Image: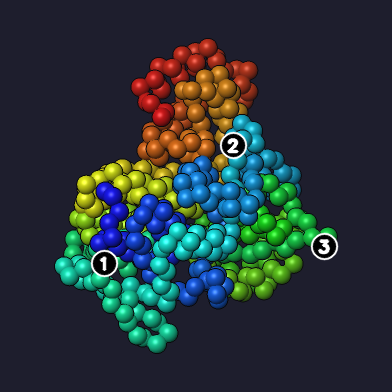
Amino acid sequence: MKPSAQNTLTIAGAGLAGALLATLLARAGWQVEVFEKRADPRSVGYEGGRSINLALAERGLHALRQAGLHEAVLAQAVMMRGRMVHHPDGHTALQRYGKDDSEVIWSVHRGRLNLLLLDAAEAAGARLHFHARLDRVDFDAKHATFVDDRDGSSIGHAFDVLIGADGAGSALRGAIDQITPLGERFESLGHGYKELEIEPSADGGFRIEPNALHIWPRGRYMCIALPNTERTFTVTLFLPLQASDGMPGFDALPDAAAARALFERDFASALAHIPDFDADWAAHPIGQLATLYLDRWHLDGRAVLLGDAAHAMVPFHGQGMNCAFEDCAALAACIAGADDFAGAFAAFQAQRLPNACAIQQMALENYLEMRDRVDDADFLLQRELERLLAQRDPERFVPRYSMVTFRRIPYATALARGRVQRELLVEATRGHTSLADVDLAALDAAVRDRLSTLDPD
C-alpha cells in the first residue's frame, strides 16, 4: 500500500515500540497519531513502571537502522561481552556471548531510549498526544475515546486503523477481545523481581567490570547487574514469590533487614557495592513476571497488536525489546507490501506469532540456564564443545544464543535448530569430563546429518 492522505494510522502507546513504529510509518509517508496515557516524559521526566535495563541486540539494531537511529542509541549504550558469573566462593568467570567483540550486546536505559524515540517520532512527522488513555473503542464507527486521568475529561478520535503498542495491560487488546476472542492466557512465572543500584566508585568510575552482564546464580534464584553510561549498575534480584523447600521467597523478606541478611549470605560481593541498600529496597516495589499468549493479534483491517500487547515475555533472553522492534519493522513492511490493511495484518500475524511463541519459550528456558546451570560443570563442558563445533562448521552449527542474539534467523528456526544442537552436545559429552574424550570426527558427521535439513537462514 502507498500512504494516503485519507488514511491516518493511530497508535495507542508511546513507549519503545509505539514510538519506533510511529517513526517508521511517518518516515514512509503515513499520517500517524500517537496517544499515550502518561505525561510527556521529555517534560516531566521518565515515569516508566520498570527500569530493568534492556539488552539491545542485532534484531533491535536492525529496526533502529531502518529508522536511522542506531548510532544515536549506541552512543548512550554500554557494551557487554558476556556473563560475568559470581560464584558463591567469591571468584568470577567471564562467559563470552560470542566469538569475540564483534558479537556483543548493549545495555541501554529504558527511559533515555524512550526519550530519544519520542523525539525521532515527532521529527518524522508523527503527532503525539499525552495524558490520553484509551478508554473505549467503537470498531463499527471507527471511533476511539481517550481519557485524561488528571481531570476525567475525554476526547473522541476517528481512526482508520488502530495499532496497539500499549503494553502487557493493553486496553486495545481488551477492546478487541470483546469483539472477537483472542485466546488470551497469562502464565505467571511464580517469581518476581526487585531493583537496586550500584553507584559509581569514589573516583567516578565503575565499581565492577563495566563490559559485562554480572550474574550471581544461586539455584532457583539469582541476582544480575547491568551497566549504565553514568557508571552505575542496575541490579535486579529475581526470587520466587513464595518461599518453599528451604528456598527464599519475597514473602519471607518483610523488610530491608531481612533482605540484607539474604544478600549477606548469598550475594555478599554485590551487597558490598550497594551502600544505600536499605533505602533502595524500600523504594522499589516487587515486580511481577508473566508470559502473555494470544491466538490472534488483529481484528480484520481495523486493529492490530504488537510488542508486549501481543506477546509479553519474561526478560531472561534479553529479547523483549528486540522482538518488539522486529515487530515494528515487520508490520511496516507488511503494510507497505499489502493491498489493504486486512491483508497486511494477517500477513504480519502469520509471520510473527509463531516466532513470538518461540522466543517466549526460549526466554523461560534461559531463566533456568542463568540461575541453575552457568556454574555447572556439565554445562560448561557443553559450552566449550559448542564453541568448538561452531569453529569447525560455522555455517551449519550456530549456537542458539548466537542465532537469537547476533543474527536475524527467525526465532522459530533458532528454537528448532537449538533443540537438535542441544541433543548433540548432551550425547557427545555424556560421561565425559574433557573434550579430549569426544570423538570429533563422528560428531562432525552427526552435525552434518542431523542439521542439514534445518536451514539456518
- Compared with 390, 276 (above or below) is below
Mark 3: give few (<14), some (14-19) or many (20+) Cα within 10 Å. few
Q: Earlier in the sequence, mark 3 or mark 2?
A: 2
Horizontally, residue 117 falls left or right of residue 168, namely right
The disc at residue 103 is 2
Mark 2: give few (<14), some (14-19) or many (20+) Cα within 10 Å. some
Horizontally, residue 105 falls left or right of residue 188, namely right
Report how far apart the C-alphas of labels 3 and 2 lie in the structure. 32 Å
Mark 1: give few (<14), some (14-19) or many (20+) Cα within 10 Å. many
Report how far apart the C-alphas of labels 3 and 1 lie in the structure. 54 Å
The spot of residue 229 in percent (x, y) is: 68, 56
Q: Disc 3 marks which residue? A: 202
Question: Please, which residue is most extreme toward the front here?
Answer: 5
The spot of residue 69 in percent (x, y) is: 53, 51
Horizontally, residue 114 falls left or right of residue 133, namely right
Q: Which corner quadrant of the image does residue 80 belong to? A: top right
Q: Residue at x 55, y 54 (%)?
A: 54
Q: Is residue 157 visible?
A: yes
Determine whether the residue tagged by mark 3 lies in a helix, strand or loop.
loop
Determine whether the residue tagged by mark 2 lies in a helix, strand or loop.
loop
Q: Earlier in the sequence, mark 3 or mark 1?
A: 1
Q: Disc 1 marks which residue? A: 159
Q: Is residue 241 visible?
A: no
- Compared with 405, 309 (above or below) is below
Q: Label 2 sits on what residue type?
A: Glu
The spot of residue 453 in percent (x, y) is: 35, 22
